[in-house]
Image (spheres, rainbow, N blue to C red):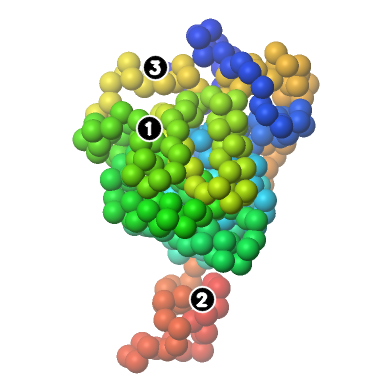
Amino acid sequence: MTKTQETELSFPAKYRLTGEMEGCADEQKLELFERLLKTREFDARMRKLFRQGRFEGTFYSQIGQEACDVVIAYQLDQQDFVGPSHRDLGASTGKGVPLKNLAAQVYNRVDSPDGGRYTACHYWHPEFWVMNPSTSIVMNWVAATGAAFGYKMLKKDNVAVAFCGDGATAHGDFHEACNFAGVHRLPIVYVVQNNLWAESLPVALTTALTDLSHRADAYGFPGISIDGNDVVETWNATREALKRARSGAGPTLIEMKTYRWHGHSDIDPADYRSDDEVAHWMERDPIPRYEQYLRELEVLSDDALTDVRARIEAEIEEAVDFAENSPRPAPDGYLSHVYAEDYPGFEFGDRNPGDANG
Ligand SMILES: Cc1ncc(C[n+]2csc(CCOP(=O)(O)OP(=O)(O)O)c2C)c(N)n1
Ligand SMILES: [Mg+2]
């Protein structure tokens, strides 16, 4: 595993991207590339900062899987609901959440949308309609399904998108959410990121299925399996599923085959995997494949790439600075957002438990 985080254009010819990205203008193709690269670079920077001891806890790297959530999130309207899980930085960056809010979340500082209360990488932002991921995995599917039900009852043409991993598909909440969405033909797209592992548990011990898209068969809506490291295929499949949801035709489940390059979180050396397996997936890195595709289309030039990299670098610097200068949450704020009213036996003092930052 000697490859650096930098994207490299050398990859086997069989992974070259071809075909049209339906309904995607050149400016959108380029903006999507910028969001993908920004997600990669921000993640790589946070991993370095964690190793330098600049923030506590851990970090859940998404490197290798970015296309799975950036591509669909990029296509959403502001008021479409997003239910991310613990490895879904791209669900926020794809939708345009500023990096400074995300950095403050990683650092657990008061300027994070959660006021510094939650665990690392549980990225969210209320103004962008990205929900706070749930600690109990795949609860976000139940919440996103509820949001989709709300959109339907209110006759809005918004959609919801929920993300999870392969391991989460064995959990009861996954099945209850799918069942309800199938019965009510809800406007929702479910994305399963099959990265072959749930912590150290291989997918073969989670399910006897080869393609997790077959999970949808039990709930009466379509399921498809795609290469989640192929931006073109991911764009077309998610675009179609979003169209289907918005038109009232109901849910779609998309299994995206992908891989996380690093451990479950950054305290996991991931020595349960073989070097060959990791190398095999690094060759299928989604970002250089897409970069090459854009170069062949003459949508991306060397000069444009220099500008993109400079903008990303500046936003990351600003975000790190913002997080490092944001205060830690005050200790006496720990009970805020827990009780609607003062609870007998607890002393809130003059602090209003409803205050955002305690
Ligand atoms: C209900 C529940 N069980 C266990 C955990 C601990 N846990 C957090 S992430 C995770 C692995 C999830 O694997 P997967 O769904 O494949 O997602 P990935 O981490 O691979 O992205 C586990 C076991 C949890 N948070 N919630
Ligand atoms: Mg997994």
Q: Secondary structure at mark 1?
A: loop
Residue sitting nearer the eye, 13 or 189: 189
Q: Amino acid at mark 1?
A: Asn
Residue in the picture at 65% in, 56% down: 157
**Crowd around label 3: few <14 · some 14–19 · many ≥20 (10 Å):** few
Label 3 and label 2: CA atoms lie apart by: 48 Å
Q: Which residue is at the far bottom?
A: 344
Q: Quadrant of residue 119?
A: bottom left
Q: Earlier in the sequence, mark 3 or mark 1?
A: 1
> Label 1, on which residue?
195
Q: Which mark is residue 50?
A: none
> Label 2, on which residue?
358
Q: How many marks?
A: 3
Image position, residue 98 (x, y; %): 65, 50
Relative horizontal placement of residue 137, taking residue 205 as reference (left or right): right
Residue 314 in the image: above or below residue 121: above
Q: Which mark is residue 280?
A: 3
Q: Is mark 1 within 8 Å of ligand 2?
A: yes
Residue 345 in the image: above or below residue 240: below
Q: Earlier in the sequence, mark 2 or mark 1?
A: 1
Given this view, does label 2 or label 1 mark the residue nearer the observer?
1
Q: Secondary structure at mark 2?
A: loop
